[in-house]
Image (cartoon, rainbow, N blue to C red):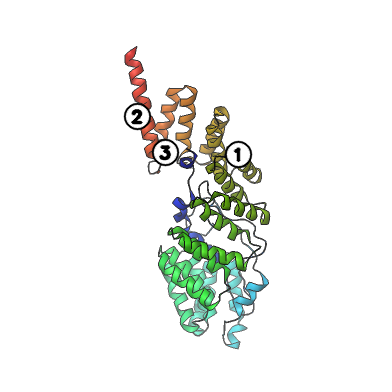
Amino acid sequence: MIRSRFIIASGYIRFFLCVFLSWGITGLNAQETKQKTEISDQVSEQIPQIGEIAPIAPIEIPEIKIPDITLPAENISEKDIKQATEKIETRKTAESDPRIDVACDLIDQKKYKEALEVLKPLAVQERDNPLVFYNLSVAYLGINEVYEALDAIAVALDVNEDFYHAYYQQGMIYMALDKPYNAIKSYEMAVRINPEFVLAYMNLGNLFYNLNSYEKAIDNYRKVIELAPNDARGYYDLANVDRVLGDYTTAVELYLKAIELDPANHFYYNNLGITYALMGDLKKAIEQFNNALKIKKDYYYAVYNLGDTLRERRRYEEAIALLRRTIKLSPNHPYAYTSLGICYQQMGDLEKAVEYYELALKMSPDSEWRREAQVRLQLLQDHLLKRSDDK
């Protein structure tokens, strides 16, 4: 069945535990935010949940390992610039201190160690300036010194308990520590102080999704859509939940809305294709996987999905070519070897099928689909043995 062929987002969402950190790797000063990853009306690209399902929002973070997909920085909107400054009260001398601006620029360039060299002396001199400790936390997190980042953001919040960006940063740190419930509390504090803080709702939705608390995830994604109706990500994230819950019709509508707002995002087409496949409409699924590959030809999730869907339609030669390409792009793909084995078995090349089933067990020992490869291999070996005995 098609359902068993896809790496569904809900089963793989733990991979983006570090993804949320990326939203915090940015400097903030008192005159303007230097943030480059806040929400904007024109979203350039987003992560899928792996699955062949696009993960929820990944960005590359130095020294923190995440899957291959990265998300370029986005421009902050005028509304977010206002939000970022409105409750940050610091001394006039601190506001005009050029060293904070220097540190912000270094953080924006991902020169975190250099930023720390600027910020550490300031942290001694400016103990009552929350911006110093906020940026210090961001810089520490940029080099994966998570506990130092946590200590620094705690100081920022001691100085200014209404600093909602600091609660957001604290939430991302807790995600790095794999403490989702602590992160939820931090994000909830952020939106309690600023009920229009879109990114906090987005990450709350992601956290609840990861915890299979789908109703709470839906509530937060709907809030994202309410506050940012022109941001494709809210519709995309909500579509992923509806797909997991089996409401494919609604999921399709939401994916199409996301595509309308951001037609250059290959993740959206891929997940739309998955949903059509789950609905049994393989023709439309193939069309959407091809659309994803027109945007990014080496997007191996779509390469695999297209190949496996063609296998479902018994177009084995085409499927084999795509599945081999999947393996070239992702040698440890958890199902491509098994799917190749099925193709060869259906074509009558049983020895080749055995070869690929064995490779599936070797290359993906921890895959949730290992059992299927084992069963198919055993049945085929028994068949070959019986055929040999009959001779």
Q: Secondary structure at mark 1?
A: helix
Which residue bears the numbered disc 2?
Answer: 378
Of all residues, the one furthest to the bottom in this rendering is: 92
Cβ atoms at labels 3 and 1 below 8 Å apart: no
Query: In the depicted view, which residue is nearer to us: 12 or 19?
Result: 12
Which residue bears the numbered disc 1?
Answer: 286
Residue 223 higher or lower than 336, as above or below: below
Instruction: Say whether residue 374 is left or right of residue 287.
Output: left
Which residue bears the numbered disc 3?
Answer: 363
Does residue 291 appear in the picture of this structure? yes
C-alpha span from label 3 to label 1? 27 Å
Q: Residue at x 57, y 29 (%)?
A: 315
Residue 342 higher or lower than 267, as above or below: above
- The earlier-in-sequence mark between 2 and 1 is 1
Q: Position of residue 32 (x, y in %)?
A: 64, 76
Q: Position of residue 65 (x, y in %)?
A: 47, 55
C-alpha span from label 2 to label 3? 17 Å
| Circle 2 residues within 10 Å: few <14, some 14–19, many ≥20 | some
**On the image, which quarter does residue 260 sit in?**
bottom right
Q: Residue at x 52, y 81 (%)?
A: 162
**On the image, which quarter does residue 288 sit in?**
top right
Q: Amino acid at mark 2?
A: Gln
| Circle 3 residues within 10 Å: few <14, some 14–19, many ≥20 | some
Q: Amino acid at mark 1?
A: Ile
Instruction: Say whether residue 266 is left or right of residue 341.
Output: right
Q: Amino acid at mark 3?
A: Met
Q: Position of residue 94 (x, y in %)?
A: 58, 84
**Quarter of the image with the C terminus in it:** top left
Q: Position of residue 202 (x, y in %)?
A: 54, 64
